[in-house]
Amino acid sequence: MRVAIIAQNSTEYISTIIDIWNAGDCAVLVDWQTPIHSIVSIILEAGVSKCYIQKGIYKDILKQLTPVEYILFDTSNTIGFLPNYIYEKYKENYSKDEALVLYSSGTTGKSKGVILSHYAISTNADAIIKYMNISKSIDIIMVIKPFSHSSTITGEILVSLKTNVKLVVSTLPPLPRIILRTIGMFGITTICINPTILSLLVDEYSKGNHKLPSLKQIYVSGSILGDYLYNKAHKLLNVHIFNVYGLTEAAPRVCAQRINCCKSNSVGRPIDGVEIAIVDDTGKQLGYNESGIIHINSPSIFNGYVVGEVKYISLYNGWLNSGDIGYLDNNDELHIVGRIDEIIVCNSHIIYPNDIENRILSHKLIDDCCICCFKNKEIDTIVCLYTSHFDCNSIIINSLKKTLIKYEMPQRIIRVNQIPRNSNGKIDRKKVLAFLQKDLIYEEQ
């Protein structure tokens, strides 16, 4: 039976997931911020028969729209350690039965329900424990990202339950000052965040109002971490900052930096049990420093989607086609260049937006940016959106001229208040294009 949970992060949320698993059921995790029409679609599509829902979130409306048993539960609006009874009732499970159905952010298309078995998430958590090298007597992990993300469930919650490492859970919004204050108050040693949150923490910490004597490592995932922020965070926070890479279909972790494996701003090497191949669009394996399609062989590959087939067919030995573009350097570390569906084809030229974005973000005055292709009067136009406290149009143009081919150069550069991103820190390119359509049409009138 599939049982949904719609709630904010809390101790009760974790307790409910374990109860669902112990009853032999599968937990369908729905981000509580998902629009109601999408929640209805998920519940019906996944065949949910029962739904635990936090008080105050859509319950009465959903009850009218879906034939599901709804169970209300309270959550404690506090910050604190996960209680011992939660650890005690968790039972290890390596069966091939369904454990989770997770719905992606859907920033480049319709959100798809990814089915993960207990075996997939448990073996992935074991590999994460191995490279994290955490200790029950020393380490304390703080959860900041939503529980509905695979990286949070497998890489933080399951890791803590398996090792009995202390876990700090908060239902409060992840404001930078609250995160930093909590790290100091509870002696947090490890946090897992996306580049957007890292940037906010660095800005807050630079004000000089916080001390982080306990913090020793930060794991960054969700989107590409720019070189400038990577180096700035290292210098200012003076802790280990490790890039990691994965995708929900791999349960999720695939690669990670470690102490001996972070020669540059890569995402490290494959974790235990995982193999990586970089191939071209014919399936031919490529050499070092050659960008191609990342294929993954892992014991933690998903069972399939609730509805639909894989978007990208395998081009290499039946391995999972990640849909990501990347390359291996001479130190066997993986670098992510972008996604197949984010590649821009402009006048028959292939352009990697993430590469251009990383170059722009290397300038200290630029806070965030996005490169996209917008069709204006049937003409493809490369557009750069950026956020900054200063007008940096000329800075961007002059810096890119030195490194980009002419056809890669943005034809329009627009300073905006914010680049839309999802809860995983990834650019929401659908919202970017919607903004551009409105902005450029208005400009022409």
Image: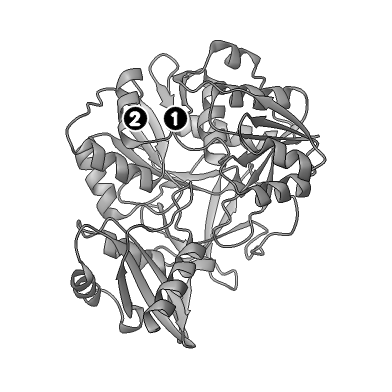
Give above or below for 90 relative to 128.
above
* Residue 216 found in image quarter: top left
Answer above or below: position of 259 versus 89: below
Percent across and percent down for residue 381 are 41, 81
Q: What residue is shown at x 65% (from left), y 15% (from top)?
A: 89
Q: What amino acid is at disc 1? A: Leu
Asked which secondary structure carries label 1, the reply is loop
Q: Would you call the spot at circle 2 few (<14 residues within 10 Å), some (14-19), or many (20 or more)?
A: few
Q: Is residue 66 above or below residue 296?
A: above
Label for residue 159? none
In the picture as drawn, the residue positioned furthest to the left comes out as 208
Identified at 69% across, 33% down, the residue is 118
Q: Which mark is residue 178?
A: 2
Quadrant containing the C terminus in the rendered view: bottom left
**Can you identify the residue that label 1 sits on?**
172
Q: Are marks 1 and 2 in contact (CB under 8 Å)?
A: yes
* Place of residue 329 in the rendered image (x, y in percent of width and height, measured from the top left): 38, 58
Earlier along the polypeptide chain: callout 1 or callout 2? 1
Instruction: Identify which residue is drawn at 40% across, 73% down.
Output: 439
Mark 1 burial class by Cα count in 10 Å: few <14, some 14-19, many 20+:
some
Q: Is there any visible trace of residue 390 in the rendered image?
A: yes
Question: Real-space Cα distance between discs 1 and 2?
Answer: 8 Å
**Element under label 2?**
helix
Give the image quarter of residue 241.
Answer: top left
Which of the 4 image quarters holds residue 161?
Answer: top right
Which quarter of the image is occupied by the N terminus? top right
Which residue is nearer to you in this view: 42 or 327? Answer: 42
| Residue 409 in view here | no
- In this orientation, which residue lies closer to the viewer: 404 or 287? 404
The x, y position of residue 41, in whole percent, is 72, 51
